[in-house]
Amino acid sequence: MSFKEYGAYDALGLAELVRTKQVSARELLDEAVARTERVDPDVNAVVVRHDDYAQRQIDHGLPDAPFTGVPFLLKDLELLDGTRTTFGANLYKDSIADHTGTLAQRFLNAGLTIFGKSASPEFGLMPTSECRLHGPTRNPWNLDHSSGGSSGGAAAAVAARILPVAHASDGGGSIRIPAAACGVFGLKPTRARNPCGPDKGEGWGGFSCGHVVSISVRDSAAMLDAIHGPEPTSPYMAPAPERPFLDEVGRDPGRLRIFFTDRSPYGDAIDPEIAAAVRDVAKMLEGLGHHVEERAPTLPTDPALVISAVVAANTAATVRLAEQKFGRAMTSDDFEKLTLGSAHNARKASAVDYVAALQNAFQISRSVTGFFADCDIFLAPTLCLPPVRIGEIDTMSDNLGQIPPLLRRYMPGTSMANMSGQPSMSVPLAWNGNGLPLGMMFTARFGDEATLLRLAAQLETERPWKDRRPPVCA
């Protein structure tokens, strides 16, 4: 297989080549490894390599599954037995997993060959992937800019065509933010659509879920078919789909009622090129026959305060577990200052404060859900500023107070769908004058990935992005 041919296929396309014996799984793995070695010195997307694990998978025989033989990366927060998982933290730089997460096992069952881990900020806490342990992951469209976070390594690897699909997760926008920054497709599924076990029943109070970023809509849909569904310890489950998610791709979405905004949920003005792109997409949607109207939900409380409280409490629990395991207090040699600062803030709060934050999240959820009584889809910018520059968000700064105001301007709208549990996607439909991608975010009702996938496929046909390549590309 030539260099050019590999990059022309999405994951289902590569799997079909393996199935019809036009190429072997070994050839695909070799190509992915060669591409990693070619472009990763520039982007730093693949921070843990275990090519031997993928080779053993092939030697032992891959299952007959939808993605048999397709190379794959797990995010460096997911456990895979016998491989290194660092969580982006110095303390765990040599940590070897002693079991496999449920989601990772479902990726294995789907036939994917997992040859490494993609970059994440420490514990997935930031919308940029610049952890101290591994260094910054750079945007293939402009190496001076961030690839986003927390699934920044996954999005950079897909954008640079190291592989067509990669694991990602989203607790406050961490699938959609890097998808927007890197010009790839990223769908955050409905709460509990995909499993979180076996070590926990939910992530970040139910805000977080795992899925993938991809170059094609159909890969995202087919992957959802392969990995969705509860496990025995799931505390709750998402509504069952009416039909396979892949069957929704190409299905007529009908005339959708679409509301949109080109402003921040706080009412602030946003980057003018992003605002113009939102209006351009709204006009395109109207041209496709949809009812389009400018309207946005009104929020009863500040989502930034809610998510910071929930994330801080979960971070404090992570730090405490480390202290119990190692028998000492954690320092900035172990964890970044942001992680320790977040844990410190949570320790100053009470259990009552945490319950109050969850109650506020519920009020936001009720407000957002009520908004969808009158519409099918809500369109907003995924990011309200272009991808930040490397170093702009410094998790080792002595002045961590400068980070929240920047986050409020940068990604104010993504966390609402995490609180409500609704499916939400970032679609690469625009680029600014400097050549940086500008993702458009579409959110649907709880459990309604079907409508999103139908619309995404329509947009993919109307304004295709798959063959648009960044300057740094394998």
Image (tube, rainbow, N blue to C red):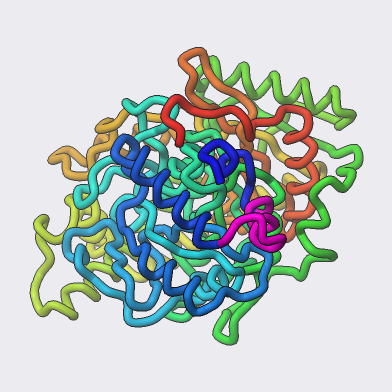
Q: Judge from the rendering whether residue 10 lies leftward or rightward of residue 359; answer left or right.
A: right
| First to last magenta residue range | 12-24
Q: Is residue 274 visible?
A: yes
Up-down relation of residue 209 to residue 375 (above or below): below
Up-down relation of residue 46 to residue 261 (above or below): below
The x and y percentages for residue 282 are: 74, 25
Question: Which residue is found at the position 23% from the left and 59% from the top?
Answer: 89
Question: Which residue is found at the position 77% from the left and 20% from the top?
Answer: 283
Q: What is the number of callouts on the image?
A: 0
Up-down relation of residue 135 to residue 204 (above or below): above
Please state, as top left, top right, bottom left or bottom right, where the C terminus lies in the image.
Answer: top left
- For the stretch drawn in magenta, what is the main secondary structure? helix
**Magenta stretch encompasses residue 307:** no
The part of the image, by quadrant, that contains residue 138 is top left
The x and y percentages for residue 380 are: 63, 33
> In this view of the protein, which residue sits in the foreground, 407 or 365?
407
The x and y percentages for residue 217 are: 69, 46
Q: Is residue 167 visible?
A: no
> In this view of the protein, which residue sits in the foreground, 8 or 297?
8
The x and y percentages for residue 85 are: 31, 66
Q: Judge from the rendering whether residue 281 lies leftward or rightward of residue 169; answer left or right.
A: right
**Magenta stretch encompasses residue 17:** yes
